[in-house]
């Protein structure tokens, strides 16, 4: 972007006089020397790569050591799986890192191991195989009871791990490309026998890092940690067409202590979707998502939310701290989705600092979300929604400020909104707020909120809660690691 801007200036000014030409030469020299600085910053030695991670490794190998070929045509499934299997022997001896050099590395699904780092070169792309027969089918998640696209099993994720500890996927912004078009077409054509795969899924695991990689065109969800804890996600880019089906960005699902920072997501579904199981299966599994930090998320998703809580929230969602959220051309900001039959809870939600541009609803809570796992859901399983805080919100070009709908006989309580300035679009709806079966307070909110959220006065503008204590995951210090090509 910046570079293009600079060249445009240069191009436009070519016809200018001498004085400006000299000024330009100085600029060009400056730009040139900046490039040099960047080049040096990244690499001093040819074939040496530095990165930061929760843990560095004592052993290294390249995918080429296992017969991998990065020509975009050779199938590397066996190379990846053999590499991981071989390197798993170093688990008790400092662990191992697998380097993926520049190239297009076509592969089917492979499994990860503990004390393991997958490092992607900036020009490396892991390309998902388009041959559906190379995707093994695994059981549905116990907290869902069913697959989401089809009742039975689900295709295993491209990169999968279960019952692991200390797993890292990182790089200098290398790419993991799901080539999802084929799957989206099958989904729309109702031709799927099983639920679509995700790009990365890790189950029953602890100490996980995903950083500085780009996920492209996932068949469905992109990054899915489930039944796991101590998860760090930093500098992730996720890109999918805005109309691609269910291409959620990051879905922390029945996870504790997760931190998502500096993430840029353009997708066809919720940018971050916080979950914890589906109806009676999620209730009986009973594993909440809790202690989740989201900072500096930028989201573009015209048909979905920047952050969704639910709709599968039957194990409960508690203690979510979201700060510095930017959403552009996104349907809503932080949305709660639930319904009768879900059970569970969404409580202690803290949102501070949102900059929003072009949005249908800034505040959206849905108490009648359908989509049940099957017909056995319990009509007495009503969700508990309470202590939901939003503060410091600036929005522009908004169609409706809020649509807040609880459940009759199950009031959603403790909603607090303060310091929110919502600029309505020219063709905005006449009634900016609709509220039913909710209870809460507001302060310093424009336009004037609904009667169910009475204004406490300007002097109460700091009244909504945002926790001051630090979570354990915020104390994790990253180490400087390196990979040197032999
Ligand atoms: C990601 O990349 C940025 C920019 O190069 C760097 O500052 C940061 O330390 C990296 N983070 C991780 C966790 O790799
Ligand atoms: C990967 O893990 C899954 C689930 O545990 C298993 O079904 C599959 O066989 C594993 N694949 C390989 C190649 O080991
Ligand atoms: C993985 O962990 C889960 C939960 O602790 C356990 O039920 C399951 O048997 C474990 N699977 C394997 C392959 O060890
Ligand atoms: C990473 O790559 C993606 C896709 O090529 C790009 O959009 C994004 O700006 C890159 N991020 C960084 C930090 O370089
Ligand atoms: C209100 O929110 C804006 C935008 O985030 C922020 O700059 C300002 O400091 C906040 N005001 C108060 C009184 O907290
Ligand atoms: C405002 O939002 C509408 C859609 O709601 C969109 O068509 C229009 O382009 C937006 N205007 C600006 C200035 O972004």
Image (spheres, grey):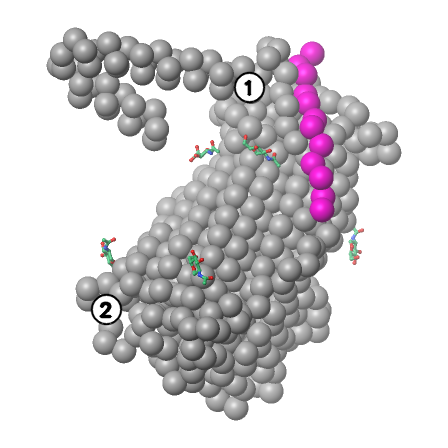
Mark 1 lies on residue: 41
- Specify whether residue 476 is painted magenta: yes
Marker disc for residue 428: 2
Task: Identify the element where label 1 is drawn.
Answer: helix
Question: How packed is label 1: few (under 14 Cα within 10 Å), some, or many (20 or more)?
Answer: few
The spot of residue 76 in percent (x, y) is: 60, 28
- Which of the two residues, 51 or 147, is positioned nearer the viewer here? 51
Q: Is residue 152 visible?
A: no
- Specify whether residue 153 is painted magenta: no
How many numbered badges does the structure rendering display?
Answer: 2
Task: Identify the element where label 2 is drawn.
Answer: loop
Quadrant of the rendered image holding ligand 5 = bottom left
Q: Which residues are magenta?
A: 475-486
- Which of the two residues, 293 or 157, is positioned nearer the viewer here? 293
Q: Is residue 372 above or below residue 42?
A: below
Question: How packed is label 2: few (under 14 Cα within 10 Å), some, or many (20 or more)?
Answer: some
The spot of residue 350 in percent (x, y) is: 56, 64
Residue that appears at 68% across and 21% down: 483
Residue that appears at 86% across and 29% down: 93
Q: Is residue 189 above or below residue 48?
A: below
- Which of the two residues, 208 or 220, is positioned nearer the viewer here? 208
């Amino acid at each position: 972007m910046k570079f293009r801007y600079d060249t445009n200036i240069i191009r436009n000014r070519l016809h200018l006089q001498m004085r400006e030409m000299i000024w330009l030469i100085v600029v060009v020299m400056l730009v040139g020397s900046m490039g040099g600085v960047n080049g040096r910053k990244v690499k001093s030695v040819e074939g040496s790569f530095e990165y930061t991670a929760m843990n560095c490794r004592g052993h290294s190998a390249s995918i080429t050591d296992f017969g991998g070929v990065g020509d975009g045509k050779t199938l590397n499934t066996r190379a990846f799986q053999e590499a991981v299997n071989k390197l798993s022997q170093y688990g008790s001896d400092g662990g191992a890192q697998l380097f993926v050099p520049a190239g297009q590395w076509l592969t089917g699904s492979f499994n990860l191991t503990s004390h393991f780092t997958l490092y992607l070169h900036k020009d490396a792309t892991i390309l998902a195989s388009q041959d559906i027969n190379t995707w093994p089918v695994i059981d549905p998640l116990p907290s869902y009871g069913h697959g989401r696209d089809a009742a039975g099993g689900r295709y295993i994720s491209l990169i999968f791990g279960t019952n692991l500890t200390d797993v890292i996927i990182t790089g200098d912004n290398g790419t993991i490309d799901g080539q999802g078009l084929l799957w989206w077409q099958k989904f729309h054509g109702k031709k799927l026998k099983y639920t679509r795969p995700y790009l990365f899924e890790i189950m029953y695991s602890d100490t996980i890092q995903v950083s500085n990689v780009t996920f492209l065109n996932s068949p469905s969800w992109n990054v899915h940690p489930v039944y796991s804890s101590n998860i760090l996600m930093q500098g992730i880019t996720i890109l999918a067409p805005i109309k691609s089906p269910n291409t959620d960005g990051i879905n922390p699902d029945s996870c504790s202590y997760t931190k998502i920072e500096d993430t840029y997501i353009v997708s066809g579904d919720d940018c971050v979707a916080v979950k914890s199981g589906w109806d009676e299966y999620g209730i009986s599994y009973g594993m909440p998502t809790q202690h989740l930090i989201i900072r500096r998320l930028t989201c573009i998703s015209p048909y979905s939310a920047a952050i969704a809580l639910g709709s599968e929230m039957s194990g409960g969602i508690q203690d979510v701290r979201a700060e510095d959220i930017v959403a552009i051309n996104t349907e809503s900001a932080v949305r709660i989705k639930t319904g009768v039959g879900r059970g569970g809870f969404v409580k202690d939600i803290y949102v501070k600092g949102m900059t929003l541009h072009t949005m249908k609803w800034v505040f959206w809570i849905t108490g009648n979300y359908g989509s049940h796992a099957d017909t056995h859901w319990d009509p007495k399983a009503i969700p508990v929604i309470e202590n939901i805080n939003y503060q410091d919100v600036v929005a522009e070009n908004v169609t409706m400020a809020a649509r807040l709908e609880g459940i009759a006989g199950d009031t959603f309580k403790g909603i607090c909104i303060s310091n929110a300035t919502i600029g309505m679009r020219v063709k905005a709806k006449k009634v900016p707020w609709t509220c039913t079966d909710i209870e809460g307070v507001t302060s310093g909110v424009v336009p004037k909120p609904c009667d169910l959220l009475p204004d406490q006065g300007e002097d109460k503008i700091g009244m909504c809660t945002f926790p001051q204590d630090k979570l354990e995951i915020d104390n994790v210090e990253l180490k400087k690691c390196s990979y040197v090509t032999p």
